[in-house]
Amino acid sequence: MKERDRWLDIGKGLGILLVVVGHSGKVVHGYMFYWAIMPLFMVASGYLFRPVSSWPEFRLMALKRAQQLLIPYLACLFVITLGRYGLQALQGNHDVIWYVKDLAITLFGGRVLRGPYTAFWFITCLFATQILFAAITVMFKEKRHQIIIIAVMYVAAHLEAMIPAVRAEIIKIPWNIDVSLMAIAFFSIGYYLKPYLKKIPIRITAVLTAVSAVLLGLNVMGYFEYTMDMKYVAYDHIVLDFILTNVLVFAVFGLFQLIDHFKVLNIMVMMGNYSLVIMYLHFVANTIVFRTMDYSLIEFVLVGITVPILVAKALERFPVTRRVFLGIR
C-alpha cells in the first residue's frame, strides 16, 4: 500500500482491535464498538475499490474477490470445523445426526454462526457487497442513478429490520447476504468520497471528534439511547444509522491522518494488514489457550492479535498456504 494510505491501515488496525476487545466479553460498553467497526471496514473497502466498466471486467473482478475472500473463508471454516469435530469425537459424541445438523448450520453461515465462527459473517457479507456494488456500476453508468439504487437498498435494509421474524432469527439469509443492502451504503461512501477521505481537513476532524466524544459520553451516561449491530440486522434509525456511523468513521480516519507519521503506530499498521486473519482466528486462538482457565481483557487481546499474526506469517512462507488461507496469489 502507498505510504499516503498508511492512515487507512491504522484505522483498520483500530477496527480489528475493537473487534477483539468486543468479543472478549470484558467490556461493559462494548456494544458501542459495533456502531462503527464494520461500517469502517466497509468504507475502507470502498475506498480501495477499483471500478469496473464492463461485464468481462466484472467477471474477472468477481473471480479475484472469490480467490481473496471465499477460498480463505472456506479453508478456515474447514480447518476449524474439523478440529471441533475431532474434539467432539474424542469426548464421545458419535451422533451422526448432530454432525449433519451442525455442518448444515456452519455452511449456512451468517448470523447463525457463534463461537469460533462469530466474525465469519463479515467476510461473506463483504464479498456480497463488493459484487453487488460492482454490478450496479456496470448496469448504471451515471453516478446519480447508482446513488439512487443504493439509497433504495438502504431503505430496504431498514424495512427488513422491522420484520419481527428477521430480528428473532426465524427468517435467516445464508451468509448474511441481506446485510449487504445496509453495508453497500457505507461501501459507497468510501468509493464516492475517496477524494475527501484522502485528506480530511483538521477543522472537520476536530468537529467530528468532538461530536463523537459527546455522543459516546451521553450514551454511557444514559442520556442517549442508540443501537446498531449489522450482524443481527439491528438497525432502527434510518437517519442516525447513516449519519452517526459516518461521523465516527470520518473522525477515526481524520485523527489517524494527523498522527500517521508516528512509528509507534507501526503495530496498528501490521494489525490492519492482517485484519482478515485476525478476524478469522482471534476467537479460536483464545478458545484454545484459555480453554480451562479464566482470562483478563489484556490476555484475550494479546492472544487474539499475536497468535493470528504469527500464524499468518508462517502461512506466507509457502505458496499453497498463502493462496488457500490468505488469498494471496
Image: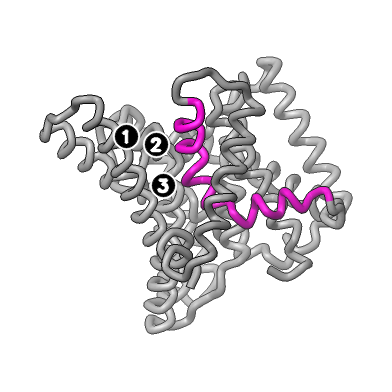
In the image, residue 269 sits, relative to residue 296, either above or below, namely below
Q: Which mark is residue 166?
A: 1
Mark 3 or 2, nearer chain start: 2
Residue stretch in magenta = 264-290
Amino acid residing under circle 1: Val
Would you call the spot at circle 2 few (<14 residues within 10 Å), some (14-19), or many (20 or more)?
Answer: some
Q: Are marks 2 and 1 in contact (CB under 8 Å)?
A: yes
Q: Amino acid at mark 3?
A: Val
The vertical placement of 170 against 15, above or below, is: above
Number of on-image labels: 3
Q: Residue 250 location, x and y as percent?
A: 72, 49
Residue indicated by mark 3: 179
Q: Which residue is mark 2?
A: 161
* Percent of width and height locating residue 212: 74, 35
At label 2, the amino acid type is Ala
- Would residue 136 be seen by someone viewing this image from the given angle? no
Q: Please indicate whether residue 203 sits to the left or right of residue 154 in the image.
A: right
Q: Nearer the viewer, residue 8 or 319?
A: 319
Element at badge 3? helix
Task: Estimate the x, y position of residue 187 in percent, counting from the top left.
Answer: 55, 57
Q: Secondary structure at mark 1?
A: helix
Q: Is residue 302 visible?
A: yes
Q: Residue at x 75, y 45 (%)?
A: 251
Chain-order first, disc 2 or disc 1: 2
**Point 68% across, 17% down: residue:** 223
Principal SS element in the magenta part? Answer: helix
Q: Is residue 231 magenta?
A: no
